[in-house]
Image (cartoon, rainbow, N blue to C red):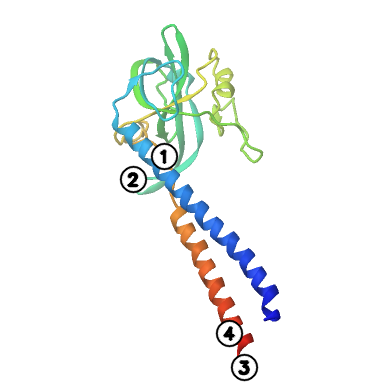
Amino acid sequence: MRALWLPGACTLAALAVLLFLGGWQVQRGVWKQAVLAEIAAAEARPAIDMPDAPALFTKVRATGTLRYDRAVLYGAEGRDIAGRPVMGAQLVVPLERPERAPVLVLLGWVAGLPAAAVPAAATVEGYIRAPEQAGFFAARDDAVARRFYTLDPLAIAPAVGLATPAPMILVALGPPARPPAPDPARSLPRPANNHIPYAITWFGLAAGLVGVFVAYARKVLRP
């Protein structure tokens, strides 16, 4: 029996860790399901007039003048257009609103900056997205070429001569559009929910550990 004390103690410690990780993933999965349900409910609700401090992922509409003459490109994304690969980016255009701070609108994917950069009155419907902060490995923005890799209103605004913008991004929602028109988002973003498969993995490892210890114990205790 003494030969099983140390292996048994190590097995119990490892088993406790595996069961804890499996239970934690189950809790995370339940939480993620609630988040997805909230996003689905928000998507089903009609858009509201954009308040000064909207919550993230709220569906809103904003009216003003889209300043295409101050548009910038965000990121880099390749797409298959007419059977050939095309490298493009997301078009970000300031929306100037009467007596309110301008807001940057992410209109959707384009192959390049629009040739006809004429301001246009518009009402944009979409959802609120948080601004980004440049990470250590983020690509360097090129303000002269109006190409940015971090979606930060406070960094983009000075490059296009814009007054202090609203501290959030309005992501336009809409049906598919063909180039050269921006192709907007179709729906609110949804995070992946892989926690239950992860939980099954941890619980499976726990079961395998128990099986290995039982087999070892039988071998040791065999007369």
Foreground disc of the pair 3, 1: 3
Q: Quadrant of residue 58?
A: top left
Q: Give the mark toward the camera: 1 or 2.
A: 1
For label 4, the SS is: helix
Q: Earlier in the sequence, mark 3 or mark 2?
A: 2
Residue on which disc 3 sits: 223
Type of the residue with mark 2: Ala
Give the residue at the far bottom of this rendering.
223
Extreme top residue here? 99
- Give the SS element for disc 1: helix
Which residue lies under the disc numbered 1? 35
Which mark is first along the chain, 4 or 3? Answer: 4
Task: Residue under label 2, please give it.
Answer: 82
Q: Tag 1 or tag 4, which sits nearer the N-term?
A: 1
In x, y percent, where is residue 136? 66, 38
Distance CA(mark 1)–CA(mark 2): 37 Å
Looking at this view, is 22 or 190 the one in front? 22
Q: Tag 2: Cα neighbours inside 10 Å, few (<14), some, or many (≥20)? A: few
Question: Foreground residue, 214 or 46?
Answer: 214
Q: Amino acid at mark 3?
A: Pro
Find residue 46 and report its horizontal and vertical position in percent: 29, 26
Q: CA distance from mark 3 to mark 4?
A: 10 Å
